Image (cartoon, grey):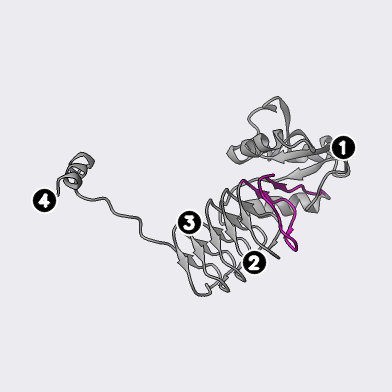
Amino acid sequence: MNSPPPHSRQPVFIFGTGRGADTARRYFADESGYDLVGFVVDREFLRETTFHGRPVVTSDEALGRFPPHDVMAFVPLGPARMNIIRRDKYLQLKSLGYRFVSYVHPSNRLHAGCTVGENCFILENQSINLDVTIGDNVVMWSGCQIGDRSRIGDHVFMASHVVVNGDAEVGEASYLGSNCTIVGGVRVGRQSFIGANALIAENTKDLAVHVVTPTPALEIDSVRFVTLLRHPI
C-alpha cells in the first residue's frame, strides 16, 4: 500500500464527481497525509469546473494539470457493470504512469502478514485476520470479516457486513452483497455476483450468480399484525 513520506502531504486527485467520489473526498478530508488537489472526469461528464472548492479537469487535461510524477490518483468508482468501469479507469490511468493511493480507515488493524494493494478503499470497522491478501482496486464497505489466509482478488467490491471465512478466495471483479457468507476454503469464481444474505458453501463458477429470494410481505397491515402478536387468536 502506498504511503506518503514522513512529514509531507502527498498530492492526490480523485477520479469522478459522483457519490463515490464525494464519499472519498469526505474520508480524505480527515486524512492528514494527503493533499486533495482536485478531481478528474471524462469530458462527457464535465458539469462544473469546481467541486467542493477544488478544480475539476477532464481526462485529456489531467496529464498537464496533475503530472504523474507529482500527483497520485484515486479511483473510488462503484461496482457498475460488475466492476468493469472501475477496473478499466484504473488501468487507463495506470497506463498513463499514475501511481495510486489506498485508503484504509484508521479504525482497522492490519495483522502481521496482511497485504493491501493499490487503489483500495477500505472503510471502517473491518475485522481482517492474519495473512490476508487484498488485491488492487478493491472496495470494502464497512464492517466486513475476512478470515485467516483468505485472498481477495483485484477489482472486487464488497458491500457492508460480508463474511469471508478462513482460507477462502474471492475471484477478481466479483461483487459480494451485504451479509453474504463465504464458507472457509471456498473459491468464489471470477466476476461472480453474490447477492445479499447468500450462503456460499461450495466453489462457484466464473460469472456465477447466487441470490436469495427476498422475504415476502404478509397479507396484513402492520397495525393489525402487532395487535395479533399482543393478543394471539
The magenta stretch is 98-124
Amino acid tagged 4:
Ile
Question: Was residue 56 drawn as part of the magenta stretch in this picture?
Answer: no
Q: CA distance from mark 3 to mark 2?
A: 19 Å
In this rendering, which labeled residue sits more in front, label 1 or label 4?
4
- SS at circle 2: loop
Amino acid tagged 1:
Ser
Where does label 2 land, which residue? 148
User: Above or below — where is 83 with respect to 191?
Assistant: above
Where does label 3 land, which residue? 179
User: Above or below — where is 80 with respect to 148?
Assistant: above
Q: Quadrant of residue 168?
A: bottom right
**Cβ atoms at labels 1 and 4 below 8 Å apart:** no
Q: CA distance from mark 2 to mark 1?
A: 34 Å
Task: Please report whichever mark, 3 or 2, sits nearer to the chain's N-terminal start.
Answer: 2
Badge 2, how many Cα within 10 Å: few under 14, some, many 20+? many
Where does label 4 land, which residue? 233
Q: CA distance from mark 3 to mark 4?
A: 35 Å
Amino acid tagged 2:
Asp
Q: Nearer the viewer, residue 7 or 18?
A: 7
Q: Main secondary structure of the magenta part?
A: loop
Task: Please report whichever mark, 2 or 1, sits nearer to the chain's N-terminal start.
Answer: 1
Task: Please report whichever mark, 3 or 4, sits nearer to the chain's N-terminal start.
Answer: 3
- SS at circle 1: loop
User: Above or below — where is 19 with respect to 101?
Assistant: above
In the shown orientation, is residue 169 left or right of residue 208? right
